Amino acid sequence: MQWLIQYFGHIPSSHRSAILVGGILFFWLIEGSWPLFQFQYNKWRHAGVNFFFTLTTILVNFPLAFILVKSSNWAVDHQFGILHLIPNLPLWIQALAGLLLLDLIGAWTAHWVQHKVKFLWRFHIIHHADQYVDTTTANRHHPGESLVRFIFTALAILITGAPMWLIFLYQSLSVILSQFNHANITLPRWLDAVVSLVVVTPNMHHIHHHYIQPYTDSNYGNIFSVWDRLFGTFKKLDQQKIIYGIDTHPEAKENSKVSGLLRIPFQKYRPAIGENSEKN
């Protein structure tokens, strides 16, 4: 465990960038060989739109990163947070508990809230409007949503009292798992049944991107699948029946161009027209 702490406690920015870029390339290659859907689209043009939002996410997070560092240092120095309630925990338990809590607060809860609060949902629509979900969709977030996610991450750090090595480990796993579970691939049923007991698989997360409710409001998980099972938001659907996108924004001029996507949060609210037409 000490090597893990040492590495992630001082992980170079170049290594973090390599995780992001390497993950996209890895799953992109797999998609090309064993795709779930044979999309009839310009893969590079589609990726270009999603890479634009990847860049805006970096631009939002980079200047605010010092807040995460300050929050972690303060929590550790003052022994504040859930991880400090029981002193001298074995490092592997601290790591597992910390990852679970960071995933619950910083990812699952943030995601759930964005689906339940109308104002935040408007920003999150950009992610759901993608009609060709692939590994690049993982980073397709409006700058406004990126800020919301950052706030929840900072809150998660304070509540857990996580040290920086654990935060960097969590963020690295979050990037890889998000790219994995958005990838245009599917696991064999027997393998998915086993793997999805622990982590979110493509089979599980694809359902979240089905174009109508209640499927849109299910399978919120990012790293661990336990939270959806625990909170009753886990759903299943035949992978071949999935239709990507969101029923409120079906037109390509709105869901496939940067200019149209950036304007969505500021348009008049459109209620869902699927099986469940109401949002809080």
Image (cartoon, rainbow, N blue to C red):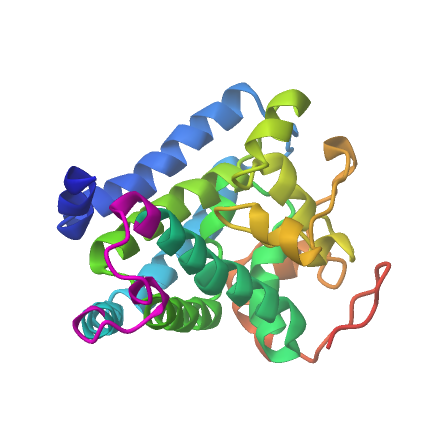
Q: How many marks?
A: 0
* Residue 26 position in % (x across, y down): 39, 29
Drawn side of residue 146 relative to residue 207, left or right: left
Q: Is residue 64 above or below residue 240?
A: below
Provide the residue span drawn in magenta: 76-94
Q: In which quadrant of the rendered view does residue 34 lie?
A: top right
Viewed as shown, does residue 71 lie left or right of 113?
left
Which x, y percent locates residue 72? 24, 68
Q: Residue at x 38, y 66 (%)?
A: 153
Q: Which residue is found at the position 33% from the left and 72% from the top? A: 158
Residue 84 shown in magenta? yes
Quarter in which the N terminus is drawn: top left
Image spot of residue 133 (x, y percent) = 59, 43
- Residue 225 vertical position relative to residue 125 in the rendered view, above or below: above
Q: Nearer the viewer, residue 13 or 28?
A: 13
Q: Is 144 one of the magenta-colored residues?
A: no
Residue 83 location (% of width, % of height): 33, 62
Near-viewer residue (118 or 80): 80
Residue 230 in view in this figure: yes
Q: Residue at (20%, 41%) from the top-left corner?
A: 4
165, above or below 33, in the image: below
Q: Write down the quadrant of residue 205 in the picture.
A: top right
Evaluate whether residue 209 shows in this view: no
